[in-house]
Amino acid sequence: MMSGFARFSPVERVIALPGGPLHIWHPPDIDALIDVAAFEADERIPYWATIWESALVLAEDLAGTAGDGLSLIELGCGLGLLSLVAARQGYAVTATDYEEPALEGVRFNADVNGLAGRLATRILDWRSPQWGRRFDRVVAADVLYEQHHAAALAAVIDILLAERGVALVADPGRRKAMTFPPECDRRGLAVETQPARRPHGATGGPEVVVYRVTRCVMPPAASRALHP
């Protein structure tokens, strides 16, 4: 039996991006990976096994930035398109997911794109996000597909985002994502909703919203009131 990511008999998809294409290898049939027992036990669905429109939009945005060694963590990375783009742009990248096969895919794709050794991978469970550091950038694409994910994601961002950091969360306009900004507000995180758009060249499919999340800065007047 084949081991590693090759056991999925992956097929290639070429993603056109500013700065040059990336070659992403992915399982050919996401439905074939569904495990009913795993879903019933832990809501596991192999969403990691394909590239979604939200990842394309955010990857295009990241491809136009300079990492300059800033630390970046991707949440729910799937096949790691955002992590690969960020690594190519010079960020110090950690790709995280709840599924080990997803991280196998990240490592496989990092290797075929000449990015092996330029990013780290790690399993991360949002229910117990133990981490000893914070990151300059936190990114996530299409991870708000269950009702309780908005609160969980806001909590994880609050834990991982550096004081002057920026989190970017892309979503294809799901109704369940509408509670994400209020959940951030509850934790003292400010959210700017950027105009929705499709990936470059796309004429159909969902329009993707990108939420830009930062830590709220206390107005000078309020700060003087607290510290006369």
Image (cartoon, helix red, strand yellow):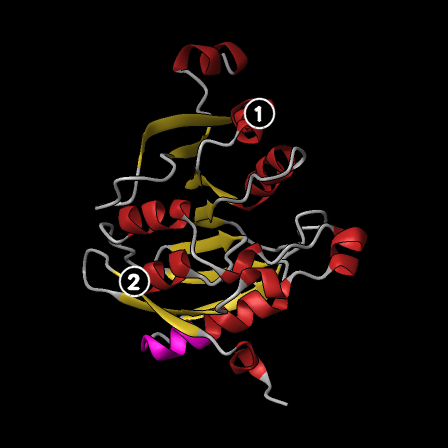
Vertical position of residue 172 compared to residue 65: above or below: above
Q: Residue 224 versus residue 61: which sits nearer the camera?
A: 61
| Disc 2 residue crowd, few under 14, some 14–19, many 20+, Cα 10 Å | some
Q: Is residue 208 above or below residue 72?
A: above
Q: Residue beneath label 2, please?
A: 90
Q: Amino acid at mark 2?
A: Gly
Q: Quadrant of residue 173?
A: top left
Q: Viewed as shown, does residue 211 lie left or right of 33?
A: left
* Residue 53 horizontal side relative to residue 66, left or right: right
Image coords of residue 104 (percent x, y)? 54, 73
| Labels 1 and 2 touching (C-beta < 8 A) | no
Let me know if residue 59 is in the magenta part.
Answer: no
Residue 176, quarter of picture: top right
Q: Report the span colored magenta.
A: 108-114
Q: Residue at x 23, y 57 (%)?
A: 17
Kindly identify the residue that appears in the image at 62 percent across and 55 percent down: 131
* Residue at the image point whose x is 31% and y is 78% from the top: 114
Q: Which circle marks residue 157 in the picture?
A: none
Q: Is residue 100 left or right of residue 224?
A: right
* Residue 88: percent from left, percent from top: 29, 65
Which residue position holds label 1?
A: 179
Of the image marks 1 and 2, the number of the one nearer the N terminus: 2
Amino acid type, residue under disc 1 in the picture? Thr
Near-viewer residue (175 or 203):
203
Q: Position of residue 124 (x, y in %)?
A: 63, 57
Residue 188 is situated, as x and y percent measured from the top left of the image, at: 55, 25
Q: Residue furthest bottom?
A: 1
